[in-house]
Image (spheres, rainbow, N blue to C red):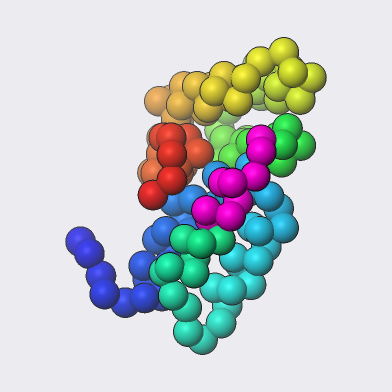
Amino acid sequence: MTTSNPRRQCERLWAANKYLVLSHSNKIYLEIRTYLKQDEVRLDQVQAYIDQALDLPENPGQVVNAFQHIWGYFKKKATASEKEMFMAQLDSYAAGRISQLHLVTSVRELLTKYPNRYLEESTLINGGSK
């Protein structure tokens, strides 16, 4: 269902792109959060912030931070071995031994076992920007 409420549209766009933005820039992530606290918001401004973040090169520290936030959705459900594996993958990514796509694949596998609609709709997990 499409809504013409600008705030609602902005919140939906932000919800889908939150972790993608965080994986590129904590600074822009915080700027968007601050912007969305204003009384009036515009969809094109939120999209401009998102585009600004996506123009930045991949930053391993930011990517690890985003995936640590994502892990929070699984930490009470996942097994100890799943946690150990995921944390080892974060370390491997930070050391340049695996790609970000490997982390995305791991999250998708966790989502098959522990479904979460919010994460499933995240552009970081399902690819690209909305």
What residue sits 61% from the left and 67% below the top? 33
Range covered by the magenta-colored residues: 50-58
- Please state the horizontal and vertical placement of residue 112, each as a whole percent of the image: 40, 25
Front in this rendered view, residue 54 or 39: 54
- Please state the horizontal and vertical placement of residue 50, each as a whole percent of the image: 53, 55
**Residue 89, magenta (yes or no):** no
What residue sits 41% from the left and 35% below the top? 126
- Please state the horizontal and vertical placement of residue 55, each as a whole percent of the image: 59, 46
Displayed quadrant of residue 34: bottom right
**Residue 51, magenta (yes or no):** yes
Give the vertical position of 58 relative to 54 (above or below): above
Give the vertical position of 26 relative to 106 (above or below): below
Front in this rendered view, residue 43 or 71: 43
Q: Residue pushed farthest left?
A: 1
Residue 11 makes an appearance in the image: yes
Q: Is residue 12 left or right of residue 58?
A: left
What residue sits 60% from the left and 51% below the top? 53
Q: Is residue 54 left or right of residue 120?
A: right
- Please state the horizontal and vertical placement of residue 78, each as a whole percent of the image: 58, 27
What residue sits 59% from the left and 74% below the top? 35
